[in-house]
Amino acid sequence: MTIKKVQPDKSKLDQIVTDARRNQELREQSYRGQALKLYPWVCGRCAREFDHKNLTELTVHHKNHNHDDNPSDGSNWELLCLYCHDNEHSRYEETRFDGSKTGKSNAPVATHNPFADLKSLLNKK
């Protein structure tokens, strides 16, 4: 018995990816455009000011980290520069995977010291 591999329709997959990207861009443009109209063009963390020349460096951060939560009053958004936005998400990931808000890891501490007896080994030569 031979099993025939069914190859997925590449054009169909390409269309799905294209549609998903387009929908994401439209969703982002929608809430980004609204946020830029609601708030002054200033980073909410470092207070850097933006104008039309560097506006692409100003991003919309979702306060609750849910990108599908986009109330029209902007209550889940804040404008952050690229650097502050990246920092915010890094801090969020650290606390999310660490399991605590303190930043202290619950991982076991290594106690093995591979060089503990090195001096006596070298003295034997």
Image: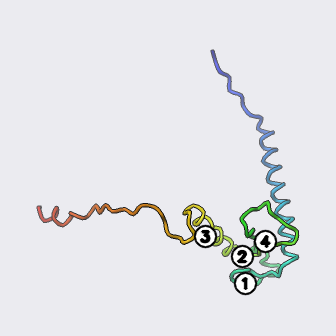
Give the numbered dot on residue 81: 2
Measured in 3D between alpha carbons, the distance from the residue under mark 4 to the one under mark 2, in whole angstroms, is 13 Å
Q: Secondary structure at mark 4?
A: strand
Mark 4 lies on residue? 77
Contact flag, marks 1 and 3 (Cβ < 8 Å):
no
Q: Is residue 24 above or below residue 100?
A: above
Position in image of residue 124 (x %, y %): 11, 62
Mark sitting on residue 48: 1
Q: Quadrant of residue 42?
A: bottom right
Q: How would you rate the neighbour count of disc 3 (Cα within 10 Å): few for under 14, some for 14-19, many for 20 or more?
A: few
Residue type (three-letter) at the residue carrying disc 3: Arg
Q: Are marks 1 and 2 in contact (CB under 8 Å)?
A: yes
Q: Residues within 10 Å of mark 1 (few under 14, many from 20)?
A: few
Q: Residue at x 71, y 65 (%)?
A: 65
Q: Quadrant of residue 23?
A: bottom right
| Labels in figure, total | 4
Q: How many angstroms separate mark 1 from mark 4 (CA)?
A: 17 Å
- What's the amino acid at mark 2? Cys
Closer to us: mark 4 or mark 2? 4
Q: Secondary structure at mark 2?
A: strand
Task: Mark 1 vs mark 3: give the one in front.
Answer: 3
Front-lying residue, 11 or 17: 17
**Upstream in the sequence, badge 1 or badge 3?**
1
Nearest to the observer: residue 5 or residue 27: 27
Residue 125 image-quadrant placement: bottom left
Q: Position of residue 27 (x, y in %)?
A: 84, 60
Instruction: Compare marks 1 and 2 and give the one earlier in the sequence.
Output: 1
Query: Is 3 left, or right, of 121 in this rendering?
Result: right
Q: Amino acid at mark 4?
A: Trp
Query: What whole-number distance in Å separates the C-alpha atoms at marks 3 and 2?
Result: 15 Å
Q: CA distance from mark 4 to mark 3?
A: 17 Å
Residue labelled with disc 3: 91
